[in-house]
Amino acid sequence: MTKGDYSITKTKVKYSIARTKGDYVITRTKGDYIITKTKGDYSITRTNGDYSITMIKGDYSITSTKGDYSITKAKVKYSITRTKGDYIITRIKGDYSITSTKGDYSITSTKEDYSITKTKVKYSITRTKGDYIITRTKGDYIITRIKGDYIITRIKGDYSITRTKGDYSITRTKRVYSITKTKVDYSFTRNMRDYSLTSTKGDYSITKAKVKYSITRTKGDYIITRIKGDYSINKTKVKYSITRTKGDYSITRTKGDYSITRTKGDFSITRKMRNYIITSTKGKYSITRQKGDYIITRTKGDYSITKTKGGYSITRTKGDYSITRTKAGYSITKTMGGYRITKKMRDYSITRTKEKYSITRTKGDYIITRTKGDYSITKTKGEYSITRTKSKYSITRTKSGYSITRTKGNFIITRTKGDYSITKTMGGYCFTKKMRDYSITRTKGKHSITRTKGDYIITRTKGDYSITKKKGDYSITRTKGKYSITRTKAGYSITRTKGDYIITRTKGDYSITKTMGGYRISKKMRDYSITRTKGKIQYYQDKGRLHYY
């Protein structure tokens, strides 16, 4: 046929279709396909289940060989290759390169200067401009930052950290520590359980060997030595001398005139300048201060303290307390496990009887009650109310607008001004924030997230997903391996049901359908229709008036 320029040949199961003006060449030989269209620049080849698709104007090239894919788009320069589950993705203008080989990753970005490599559990990250180098090999870390001058190394639990400008050096090897700071002159070393600390400018030297201590500070004049539990402390300028030998103490301060001696459990303290005399003999205390008017006596666990000018009187006899302060108006009494505290000046009243508490403050408006583990707290002006009854909580604060309730494991949290509302009931969550229009609900493994202004709705029910965004017009649904993706403005619709694909693009007018191993491709703008069903080709072109089945 000359004018229409068609040529159709069928030899047994071999097909050959040619059309010159419309530029089609279709050949089929034992299930293998070759389709070529020159002006539209399509080339499709299928050989033994392998595919090769080329579109010159759109600059796409797709190749599939036994499950391995290679996709190339020239103008925006994408290249995707998949070989036995391994990926190579390259984008030239954005300068990304991603490689995955058997679970190992390699990511490179030229402009931002990133390089990330993962091999089994070994990591290597490099960033040139920010000057980071991070390496991890079997749990060991090496981190380097050049401008910030950090070097961090970790090998088998041992650490080494160096910072150049700040002049820090920290090393840990087998529980041995060494810390050095140059400018302020610190040096610290810990070996097993022994310490050594040296500071040049502050003049410190601290040494601990097993349980022996030695501390020296030159300008402040300290010398401290401890050997086998015995102490010797000397401070020169203010003249301290402390000695402890086998449990007995001797402390002397010359200028302040202190002398403290403890021998076999008995104490004797004398300070001449301010008239103190303290004596303890076999658990009995006697403290006398003449000018400040104190008299303290303890005999067999009972106390009696009297201070005349400040008006104190404290008495304890066999576990019961009585404390009185006249000027400030305090009175505290404890009898048989119960407390009673009264302060007249500021209106406090505290009562405790066995395990029951009651606290009242009139002017500050507090009322606190505790009865066998249950709490009730009220503050009027600050507006607090807290209640706890066994395992039930209730907290209320009016002005800031909080309300928290917990009843047997279920939470209800409300914040009025900040507009939060959180509810947990029988394993389900509900979260709402009015200001930014969020609503999150979880009920026994089912999730629902709603954001009004941003128009997101996300629902998850037993592993199935549904995502909707109104303004951008997205809708994604997944139900037991079945996918459905819709974008209204750009006009995409993708559906996958048990291995079958349906892809529709409204503006570009593509329609691709794959069902039970058969293909159907339609393009409205140029009136193409290609159908393949289990090895058979059906071809149709309306304007060229070619119909072939």
Image (cartoon, rainbow, N blue to C red):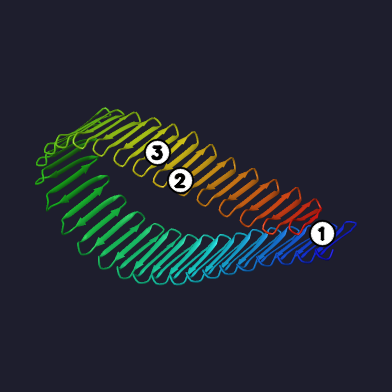
Residue 481 higher or lower than 22, as above or below? above
In three-dimensional space, the C-alpha distance between marks 2 and 1, rounded to whole angstroms, equals: 53 Å
Secondary structure under the numbered disc 1 in the rendered image: strand
Secondary structure under the numbered disc 3 in the rendered image: strand
Quarter containing the N terminus? bottom right
The residue under label 3 is 413
Kindly identify the amino acid type of the residue bearing the numbered disc 2: Thr
Q: Residue at x 35, y 70 (%)?
A: 185
Q: Is residue 154 left or right of residue 366?
A: right
Q: Position of residue 182 (x, y in %)?
A: 37, 71
Mark nearest the camera among 3 and 2 is 2
Residue 482 higher or lower than 257, as above or below? above
Q: Residue at x 22, y 64 (%)?
A: 236
The residue under label 1 is 32
Q: Residue at x 70, y 54 (%)?
A: 522
Residue 42's disc number: none
In three-dimensional space, the C-alpha distance between marks 3 and 2, rounded to whole angstroms, equals: 21 Å
Q: Position of residue 332 (x, y in %)?
A: 20, 33
Q: Position of residue 434 (x, y in %)?
A: 40, 43
Kindly identify the amino acid type of the residue bearing the numbered disc 1: Asp
The residue under label 2 is 452
User: Which of 217/376 is in front?
Assistant: 376
Q: Are marks 3 and 2 in contact (CB under 8 Å)?
A: no
In three-dimensional space, the C-alpha distance between marks 3 and 1, rounded to whole angstroms, equals: 66 Å
Secondary structure under the numbered disc 2 in the rendered image: loop
Q: Is residue 535 left or right of residue 365?
A: right
Tally of marks: 3
Q: Is residue 472 left or right of residue 353?
A: right
**Which is nearer the N-term, disc 2 or disc 1?**
1
Mark nearest the camera among 3 and 1 is 1
Label 2: how many Cα within 10 Å (few below 14, some 14–19, many 20+)? some
**Which is nearer the N-term, disc 3 or disc 2?**
3
